[in-house]
Amino acid sequence: MKTVKISLNSIDKVKAFVNDVTKFNTDFDLVSGRYVIDAKSIMGIFSLDLSKAIDLNIHDDENMDDILKVLAPYIVE
């Protein structure tokens, strides 16, 4: 598992993010405070505070390079 910080500060970014993560056959969790949301759930994402960076847990070891490449536009340092 790997955790990265991502920013989803617009509706278009959320839609594009969900489309990107659903391409992979692995689990993604968004963690904001005490809430853990399935990152493939657009309704779940909109229940979070999107004004600040969110932790994304990627539950995959084999395709990590491909996943990080696709998610690069959302990752913040």
Image (tube, helix red, strand yellow):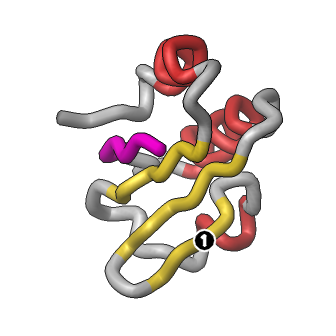
Q: Of the residues shown, which amino acid type is indicated by label 1?
A: Ile
Query: Percent from the top left, x then y, of residue 9?
Result: 41, 51
Residue 41 image-quadrant placement: bottom right
Task: Name the residue: 82% across, 35% down.
Answer: 25
For the point 53% across and 75% down, the residue is: 36
Residue at (77, 30) in percent of width and height: 24
- The answer to if 56 sits in the magenta stretch is no
Quadrant of the snapshot with the C terminus: top left
Instruction: Residue 32: give x, y in percent of width and height.
Output: 38, 73
Name the side, left or right, on which 36 lies relative to 38.
left
Q: In this view, does 25 lie above or below 15?
A: above
> What crowding class fits label 1: few (fewer than 14 Cα within 10 Å), some (14-19), or many (20 or more)?
some
Give x and y (percent) for residue 76. Answer: 26, 36
Q: Vertically, is 69 above or below 30?
A: above
Q: Where is residue 58 in the image (x, y as percent from the top left)?
A: 53, 44
Which residue is pictured at 67% across the width and 72% down the height? 44
- Asked where in the image residue 15 lies, by quadrant, the reply is top right
Q: Name the residue under label 1.
A: 37
Picture quadrant of residue 73? top left
Q: How many labels does the image show?
A: 1
Most common secondary structure along the magenta stretch: strand
Image-based side of 15 in relation to 66, left or right? right
Element under disc 1:
strand
Q: Nearer the viewer, residue 46 or 5?
A: 5
Of residues 50 and 67, which is closer to you in this image? 67
Q: Give the range drawn in magenta.
A: 1-6
